[in-house]
Image (tube, rainbow, N blue to C red):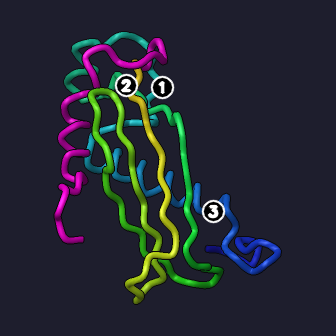
Amino acid sequence: MKDRFDNDMYAHLNNTVYAMLFDSIVNSWLIAECGMDPFNRNKSTASDSDTERNISQQVGIMVNSYCDYFASVSYPDVLDLGLRVARLGSSSVTYEVGVFRQGEEDVKVVGGYTHVFCARETMRPAEGGMEERVRRGLERLVVREGAKL
């Protein structure tokens, strides 16, 4: 957090900052671990050169979001974020992000959103589901029922 303006008028971290944090951790994972390339704006169909360079032909479109608050954090707190996949469908994924004050075990905020993976060219849900490399990266974040966190 850069300055006091990250806090709202009640000295709580501004709600819009949570949305930015959630978006940042999810997209960092998609880029680093799932091979997504949001900087390539090529909307043409996949060519051999695109395939060779592993350019994704899909984009994740956010279709809903939520945020539940359990305790307050504020600037200049240092925060830790935890990311997991709550649901993995054929063309959609629901992420869950936990926000913790550094050094504390109690979660302060839990939020997330759902992406539907769409064809870049049409912006419609991808036929055949999400790309395999994206699925493999997201599967690593699925927390199985009964697993200890």
The residue that label 2 is drawn on is 58
Estimate the spatial distance between the alpha carbons at disc 2 and disc 3, rounded to whole Å.
27 Å
* First in residue order: circle 2 vs circle 1: 1
Residue interval drawn in magenta: 120-149
Query: Residue at 27% across / 42% down in the picture?
Result: 34
For the N terminus, the quadrant is bottom right
The residue that label 1 is drawn on is 41
Question: Is 87 located above or below residue 52 in the figure?
Answer: below
Question: Is residue 139 left or right of 37 when viewed as pictured?
Answer: left
Kind of residue at badge 1:
Arg
Single out the mark in the foreground, 3 or 1: 3
Residue furthest out toward the bottom: 103
Which mark is on residue 17? 3
Query: Residue at 34% across / 37% down in the picture?
Result: 36
Residue at disc 1, secondary structure: loop
In depth, the one of 31 and 82 nearer the eye is 82
